[in-house]
Image (cartoon, grey):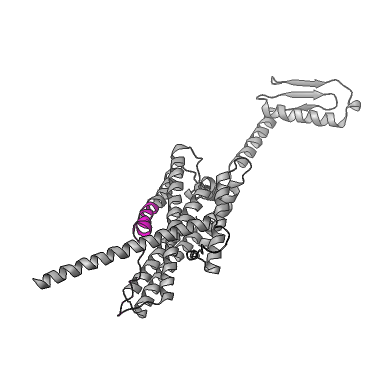
Amino acid sequence: MNPGIILSHRKNTSAMPHHSCNILNLLVAISLATCPTAWTFTPRWTHFHCQPEMLERTRIKRRHNLIHVRSPSPSQLNAIDSLSAAAAASAPVLSDYTPAATSLFNNMKLPAAVVTAGMISLGFATSFPELPPDSPERQYSPRLRRRCESLRRLHIVTALVSVTSELIVVMWAAVEVNQLTERVYAPTATVWDLVQRDCDLAWSAVNSHFVLGIIGFVTMLALRAYVMLLAAEASSALMTAASTGTAAALCLMISIVNRGVEAGGGEGVGYGKTILDLVRHYGILLARCATDAESPGPLEFSAIVLEVTSLAFALQVLLLANDKMEDEEECPVVDLDSDYAPLTSKEQEKLDICLAMEARQHELTDSSKKEKAKELDSDSSVNIL
């Protein structure tokens, strides 16, 4: 008999439970798989001798089974390769897109600064055009003059809103560029993912205010051009051509913005379809940030309240056409001989102003009379000579 491991069992087989036999068979299988030499197992209830030939056949069969399991067919290999390639292609590659996001904000900051300089020069440094005084050749109706005065007031408000809107773009973009440079952001699959995750409010605000400022700038140009054409005695056909061309440019600009909003980050990910969706998204994010429980923004909330108030008064002006200050009453007439109640402080102030204006008018009249008398004297002396 070959040397090996001899296992024996001396217990009575009648008392052996069924699960003990199963455990014993498992131990036999483990010994068969791990033992390098022949072995003999001789319990009382059975007699089993493992011969070398049987052990070799078992080893060959076990090796064949392992090889069969570990060696897939060529079709299976191709299927595994294709699945691996598809998984690798579908898995996004994460990268650091902070430089690209910084470039996006810089692309908005520089044009906004240039437009702001132009609007300040056009809206405040340069006076609004006016209609010339009436002449025998050309008279302007009082209604047309009142309309031009209303447009001048509208021009001032439009310039103010447009300049402040572009200044918000410059400020927000500059702060966001500093944040992108100073902080460390987690890698993302695209720059759009980075903007949506960490710069959503800033990016929507910059785009919204930039577009509103550009629309206001075009409105300023249209108002000035209308009054200038009136003063230049342009024909109705020329004014129609100018107005329709300006409206076409404004429509095209709004359409460009709508296309950009609709495209978004690609694959249907964006703010919506039009500029209104962009502004609505910006308003929702700003309100959410202003009312955040962990980090509330009282100044942001104040800005929202003040903007709503401004829009309400602007709507009132449009509906009631009360853009002009009410004319003050004429100077009060005071009868010193009557027993009227004494004047109030406001009436007394108005009376003093009227008396000063009247005295100034008398002085101008006297000076003009003196100048005319001097001219007459000089003319008479020249005639005598």
Magenta-drawn stretch contains 134: yes
Quarter of the figure with residue 377: bottom left
Magenta stretch in the rendered image = 110-137
Evaluate whether residue 5 shows in this view.
yes
Evaluate whether residue 281 shows in this view.
no
Residue that extends furthest to the right in the rendered view of this protein: 14
Locate residue 260 relative to residue 110 in the image: left or right: right
The location of residue 368, given as percent across then percent down, is 28, 65
- Pick the front one: 375 or 9: 375
Q: Quadrant of the N terminus?
A: top right
Locate residue 86 relative to residue 103 in the image: left or right: right
Locate residue 21 relative to residue 162 in the image: left or right: right
> Is 366 placed above or below 114 here?
below
The location of residue 179, given as percent across then percent down, is 46, 40
The location of residue 288, given as percent across then percent down, is 60, 49
The location of residue 290, given as percent across then percent down, is 59, 47
Quarter of the figure with residue 98: top left
- Pick the front one: 340 or 48: 340
> Is 206 placed above or below 8 here?
below
Looking at the image, how many numbered discs can be counted on the residues? Answer: 0
Q: Quadrant of the C terminus?
A: bottom left
Q: Residue at x 19, y 68 (%)?
A: 375
Magenta-drawn stretch contains 357: no
